[in-house]
Amino acid sequence: MKNRILIIFLLIAFISEAQNVISLYPDKAPGSEHWNWQEKKILTDTTHQWHTVYNVVEPTLTVYTPEKTLNNGTSVIICPGGGFHHLAINKEGTAVAKWLNSIGITAFVFKYRLVKSQFDASGKAIRFSTANRKRFDSIIAPIVSFAIHDASKSIKYLRDNADKYNIKKDRIGIMGFSAGGTVATGTVFSPEGVGNRPDFVVPIYAFTDPLKQNTVPSDAPPAFILTAADDLLVPATSSTKLFNDWIASGKSAELHIYSKGGHGFGMQKKNLPVDGWIHRFQDWLDVQGYLNNTK
C-alpha cells in the first residue's frame, strides 16, 4: 500500500512538472531539425546543488508561478548564461525565478539551443576555449541567431497567452546573464521583435559582441543594466556602451557597476555588496511601476 501511494505521488509530481514546461515548437525547431543528440543535466556544485545543462535541442520555457495573493501581473523570461555551450540553470535561472516569485512576478526560465558539447570518459563536459576568439565566434554565430529567434517567439507566445498564465500583456520583461544577456538584448535589436518587443530588458554582465545589429530602435523598452568592474571575461565596457546607447537614443536606462563580483555571480553569495544586486533590480521594478497591480 505504501509503495502504491509513493508511486502515485511521484506520478503526480512528474505530471505537475511536465505541465509547467512550454515547448515553443510542436516539432523540431527550425534550423536544427537534424540535431539528434540528447540534452544533459549535470550536478556541478555539490555544495549548492547547482546543475549545468548541456546540449539543448528543444527550446522551452519552464513556468514558476507566485502565490495568487502576491501576483502583480508582471512576468520575466530568464535566460541563463554559459557561452552558448551550457546553461547555468540554477544560479542564473531557477534561483532567480523563485526569488522573483517572492515579489509577485511570474517567471519563465528559458532553455535555448546550444552548441553541441563533448564529454570525456568520466562524463565531464570538455570545456570550450575562448583563446581562439575568431573560431569561438564562428562556432556560436548560428546558435546566437537561433536563440534570439526563439526568445522573440517566447515573448510573442506569452503575449498571446497572457490570460492562461495570469500575466499582463504589457508587463512582459526579459532578463539575461552573460550569453543570456546577448539573447535578451537581441530581442530588442532584432527585426523580428518589431511590434512585439519586451516591455523591459535586463542585461546582466551581458556579452553583446555577437549582436550584429546594435542600433537602439525607436521602440526600445526601459533597460536595467548591471555588471562588475572586475569582470575579466566580459569587460564592464560592454554594459556601459549599452547604457550610453540607450541614453543617447532618448530611452530610459539604469546602470549599476559593482567594483567586485567577477563574472557569473548570478544568485551565488560572495559576501560582497554585489550579493544585493537583485534588490536593486527590485527597486527599479518598483520605480517603473511593475510591482503594483494597477499599472
Image (cartoon, helix red, strand yellow):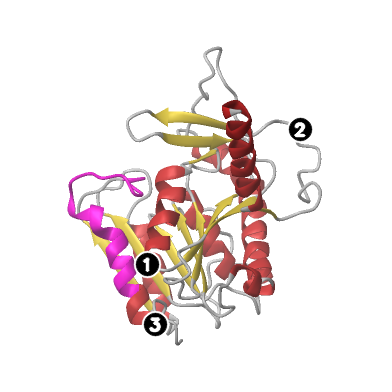
The amino acid on which the numbered mark 3 sits, given as a three-letter code, is Gly
The residue identified by callout 3 is 289
In the depicted view, which residue is nearer to us: 25 or 257?
25
In the image, which residues are magenta? 263-284
Q: Earlier in the sequence, mark 1 or mark 2?
A: 2
Q: Is residue 45 magenta?
A: no
- Identify the mark at residue 248; answer none if there is no mark: none
The amino acid on which the numbered mark 2 sits, given as a three-letter code, is Asn
Q: Residues within 10 Å of mark 2 (few under 14, many from 20)?
A: few
The residue identified by callout 2 is 36
Whole-angstrom CA distance, mark 1 to mark 2, is 40 Å
Left-right relation of 271 to 148:
left
Q: Is residue 88 visible?
A: yes
- The N terminus, quarter of image: top right
Left-right relation of 52 to 27:
left
Mark 2 element type: loop
Q: Is residue 264 magenta?
A: yes
Is 115 drawn above or below residue 209 in the view shown?
A: above
**Camera-nearest label, 1 or 2:** 1
The amino acid on which the numbered mark 1 sits, given as a three-letter code, is Ile
Q: Earlier in the sequence, mark 2 or mark 3?
A: 2
